[in-house]
Amino acid sequence: MEFYKMNHGVSFTDIEKFNYPNKKMGVIIHIEDKDGKILLQQRGSKCRDENYLYEDVGGSFDKDDKDFKSAIIREMKEEMGEAANVKISNPIGIYHVCKNDINWVFIIFNGKYIDGEIKIMEPDKCIGYKFFSYEEAINSCEVSVSCKYLIRSIRS
């Protein structure tokens, strides 16, 4: 696992530098509320990995996505519905993690939960949402190791 903080917008040129076998691109949004609590989703039985553990919202970058921000907006709508009001930052970094022989390269966004209902839109892939304090997330056996790494990296 590696996290690279970026002080400029992330481009496709930045991603090309990550030359891994079996590479897939994705997007993740790290969402916090006004009190600094972290919103995580509990993954369901039909997820490709980390079943029943909590992770940040995100998913694959699709060939139809025009850019990384449109990809994370699409993922949020697919997973949380359209009623959740989340302010999205520009990309803050690139995260590499290898899961099940896939080298995932994720573009990371920060999000600020403002208000609105967070829905379970894909019940086979998500069985719930929960806000965690930083300490609760880092110390919970229900939060995936890779998510804990990303949370620590974002906070440092």
Image (tube, rainbow, N blue to C red):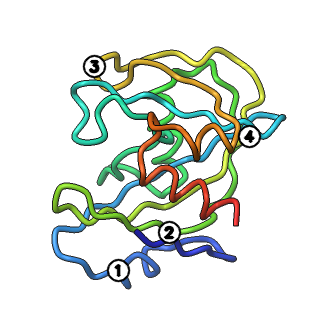
Location of residue 54 in the rendering, given as x and y in whole percent from the top left corner:
45, 35
Q: Name the amino acid type tagged 4.
A: Lys
Q: Which mark is residue 112?
A: 4
Q: Distance between the residues labelled 4 and 2?
A: 19 Å
- 19 sits to left or right of 115: left
Residue position marked by numbered label 1 in the rendering: 18
Which mark sits nearer the N-terminus, 1 or 2?
1
Q: Compared to 38, does 153 lie above or below? A: below
Which mark sits nearer the N-terminus, 4 or 2?
2
Instruction: Tell me if residue 148 can be seen.
Output: yes
Image quadrant in which you'd find residue 78:
top left
Q: Do the residues labelled 1 and 3 touch (CB within 8 Å)?
A: no
Q: How far apart are marks 1 and 3 (CA)?
A: 31 Å
Location of residue 18 in the rendering, given as x and y in whole percent from the top left corner:
35, 80
Residue position marked by numbered label 2 in the rendering: 94
Q: Are marks 1 and 2 in contact (CB under 8 Å)?
A: yes
Which mark sits nearer the N-terminus, 4 or 1?
1
Which mark sits nearer the N-terminus, 1 or 3?
1
Q: Distance between the residues labelled 1 and 2?
A: 10 Å
* Element assignment for label 3: loop
Location of residue 152 in the rendering, given as x and y in whole percent from the top left corner:
61, 59
Instruction: Tell me if residue 74 can be seen.
Output: no
Q: Which mark is residue 124?
A: 3
Q: Compared to 98, does 36 lie above or below? A: above
Q: Name the amino acid type tagged 3.
A: Asp
Q: Quadrant of the C terminus?
A: bottom right
